[in-house]
Image (spheres, rainbow, N blue to C red):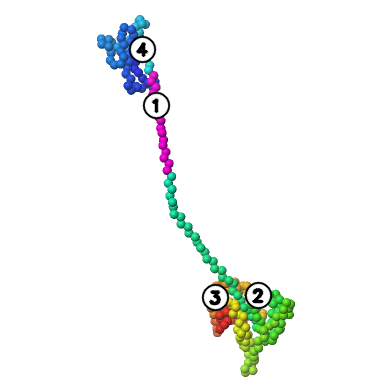
Amino acid sequence: VVAAYTLSGSWVGGLRPVLVAGPGRGSVAGGGAPSGKHLRTASEDQSLEAPSHKAHVLHRTNTTTRTTTHTKTVTHSSTTRTKTPTTTQTATTTSTTVPDPKLFCFTILGSDDNEVSLMREQLARGAGIYGCDSWSVYSDEKTWLTPGPPVRLDSTLVTANSSSPDGVNNTKYKDSPQFIRAWEKMREEGTFEKYDWVVKANAETVFFPDRLKALLKQRGESPKNATFFTNCEAADNSYSMIGALELFSVEAAKV
């Protein structure tokens, strides 16, 4: 009896055992054994002496199962377009340029020759009040500041009675009448009104107009306000100025 099997030794579904017998012994194909006959095993067939009566014992059935799997992969690609609203924010910076302050500067000269020499030297160097946007020099005696070329420049004459009413020489306020007259003359001319700030400086004062402009610009002071700056805190007056350098807004100078 030969059992049909695969090469791997496992049963193949649908196949049944098949007996192949020698001549005269009948054969069975398919199902059960013939009636009245005895089915022998392969070992019993081998014990027979007549070769012609020997059964062909072993028939090996090789069954190869080939399984071909066809896999078809269908890929669906989809493109989704999404419109996203875009918001653009633009930052606008407004820059305000503050112009440099404009200065009108003046000096009041006495009869001291040293003061006259200082003012002439400063004019030759463009120093002191001559570095302002506009300037004027007032004196009790008209004198030249530069003989030229290109042109001769003279001081502006202002006259005032500087003697004390009682005939006593009061040095503390000796120059006050001349200073008051110089302020009056400046207002009469009206040139200072074209500028932002009015500076009165003594002839011997070391004065840097550009530095003063930078400080005024940094502070953001408005010349439209009637403002003056104190430069001396006296014991009897905390709002006082010394004459070396006096600073007023154009509005204050009009008062």
Mark 2: amino acid:
Gly
- The magenta stretch spans which residues? 62-78
Pick whichever of labels 2 and 4 is earlier in the sequence.
4
Front-most of residues 137 and 80:
80
Disc 1: CA contacts within 10 A as few (<14), some (14-19) or many (>=20): few
Above or below, comparing residue 13 to residue 196 in the picture:
above
Mark 3: amino acid:
Ser
Dot 3 corresponds to which residue?
A: 222
Callout 1: SS = loop
**Residue positioned 31% across, 8% down in the render:** 25
Front disc: 3 or 4:
3
Pick whichever of labels 1 and 3 is earlier in the sequence.
1
Q: CA distance from mark 3 to mark 4?
A: 129 Å
Residue 13, located in which quarter of the rendered image?
top left
Dot 4 corresponds to which residue?
A: 57
Front disc: 2 or 4:
2
